[in-house]
Image: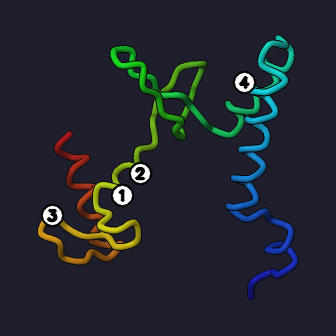
């Protein structure tokens, strides 16, 4: 049986997103020139498992989920990007021919692509 009291105390994805946006906005608007606040923000960013992926040629950047060991990025989680490749309308996963995919089909296709690369 599911523990409902635990479920109620755990924040939802939307609550986490709202808190994250608020924290970033506060930092941008009032803390980024303060060295101590920059250190606190960097530690929080790192503790959240977030990394910034920067294309040095174009200047484009993305905030992604990553794994850092001994201050070195060892893995960049690309699952969301891989899943987006199969999105038709933001809700339906399809193969290149437009046929609907199940989650099992999606996982199989992604694992096949990872073997090639």
Classed neighbour count for the residue bearing mark 2: other residues with Cα under 10 Å, few (<14), some (14–19), many (≥20):
few
Above or below: residue 78 compared with residue 109: above
Residue 26 picture location, percent across and down: 81, 33
Mark 4–mark 2 CB contact (< 8 Å): no
- Residue marked by disc 4: 42
What's the distance in space between the residues labelled 3 and 4, CA to CA?
A: 40 Å
Where the C terminus falls, by quadrant? top left
Classed neighbour count for the residue bearing mark 3: other residues with Cα under 10 Å, few (<14), some (14–19), many (≥20):
few
Task: Name which quarter of the figure residue 47 lies in.
Answer: top right
Please report whichever mark, 1 or 4, sits nearer to the chain's N-terminal start.
4
Checking the image for residue 79, the label placed there is 2
What's the distance in space between the residues labelled 4 and 2, CA to CA?
A: 24 Å
Residue at 87 percent of width and 77 percent of height: 5
Mark 3–mark 4 CB contact (< 8 Å): no
Please report whichever mark, 3 or 2, sits nearer to the chain's N-terminal start.
2
Above or below: residue 25 compared with residue 108: above
Residue 63 picture location, percent across and down: 53, 35
Residue at the left extreme? 97
- Residue marked by disc 1: 83
Residue 21 picture location, percent across and down: 72, 44
Say left or right for 111 vs 2: left
- Residue marked by disc 3: 96
Secondary element type, mark 1: helix
What's the distance in space between the residues labelled 1 and 2, CA to CA?
A: 6 Å
| Foreground pick, 20 / 1 | 20
What's the distance in space between the residues labelled 3 and 1, CA to CA?
A: 13 Å
| Foreground pick, 56 / 65 | 56
Residue 92 picture location, percent across and down: 34, 73
Above or below: residue 97 compared with residue 46: below
């Amino acid at each position: 049986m599911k523990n409902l009291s635990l479920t109620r105390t755990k924040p939802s994805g939307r609550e986490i997103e709202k808190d994250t946006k608020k924290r970033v906005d506060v930092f941008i608007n009032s803390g980024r020139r303060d060295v101590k606040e920059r250190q606190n923000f960097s530690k929080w960013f790192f503790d959240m498992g977030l990394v910034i992926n920067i294309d040095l040629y174009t200047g484009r950047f993305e905030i992604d989920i990553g794994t850092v060991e001994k201050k070195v990025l060892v893995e960049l989680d690309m699952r969301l990007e891989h899943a987006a490749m199969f999105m038709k309308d933001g809700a339906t996963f399809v193969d290149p021919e437009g046929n609907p995919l199940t989650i099992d089909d999606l996982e199989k296709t992604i694992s096949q692509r990872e073997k090639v690369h």
